[in-house]
Amino acid sequence: MSFDRERERRNDEVHADHKEALARGEKRVLRRTDTGDLHSYRADEIGFSPGRGQAQVRSWWGMGILSAVMGLLVLLSLVLLLSPVGRGEQPFWGALFLTALGGFGAWYLFSMARGEYRAKKLRTERRAPEPGAGHVPQ
C-alpha cells in the first residue's frame, strides 16, 4: 500500500470539518467510506453499518429477511404451544420461550432494518457515500 498525499490531505480536511461540526453541537460520526476516505456522517445517516454492533448483514432488506425468519419462528412456536390442545392435552408451555425469543428477535431486527432503510434514504438524498467497515478513533 502506497502513501497517497492527496487522500491524506482530504482526510485531514474532513477531520477538521468534523471537529468544527462537533464544536457547533452537531451530532456527527467520523467513518471511513467503502473507498477508504474519511467522511463525517450526520447521526441520522448511520444505520446499523459495521462498527455499530458489528452487524454482518449490511442492507436493510437483509435485516428484513432475518426479521421475517424470526416471525416464522414465532408462528412455529405457537403451533408447538397449541398443538397438544387439539388432542385434549395441556399446552406445551416450553414453547413460550421460543415465542418470546422469536418475538423479541423479530422486533429488534425489524427496527434495525427500518433504521438502515431511513439512513440509506437520507444518504441517497444528501449524496453521502456508503459507510465502510471499522471505526475511526477520535
Image (tube, rainbow, N blue to C red):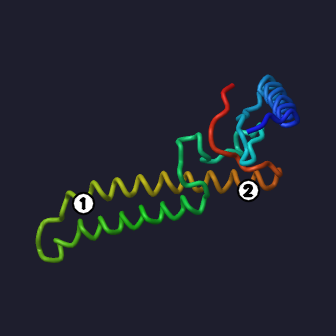
Task: Name the residue tied to disc 2.
Answer: 121
Q: Quadrant of the C terminus?
A: top right
Q: Residue furthest bottom?
A: 87
Left or right, 124 with reference to 86? right
Q: Residue at x 81, y 29 (%)?
A: 21
Q: Residue furthest front?
A: 2
Tell me the element at label 2: helix
Residue 95 is tagged as 1
* Percent x, y of residue 61: 59, 63
> In the depicted view, which residue is nearer to us: 102 or 16?
16
Of residues 16 and 24, which is closer to you in this image?
16
Asked which secondary structure carries label 1, the reply is helix
Q: Quadrant of the N terminus?
A: top right
Q: Quadrant of residue 43?
A: top right
Give coordinates of residue 94: x percent, y percent. 20, 57
What is the count of numbered marks? Answer: 2
- Count neighbours of disc 2 (C-alpha within 10 A) and say few if under 14, some if 14 to 19, many if 20 or more: few
Question: In the image, what residue type sits under mark 1?
Answer: Ala
What kind of residue is marked 2?
Lys
Q: Is residue 121 left or right of residue 70?
A: right
Image spot of residue 16 (x, y percent): 83, 26
Q: Is residue 132 above or below residue 8?
A: below
Dividing the picture into quadrants, the one containing residue 93 is: bottom left
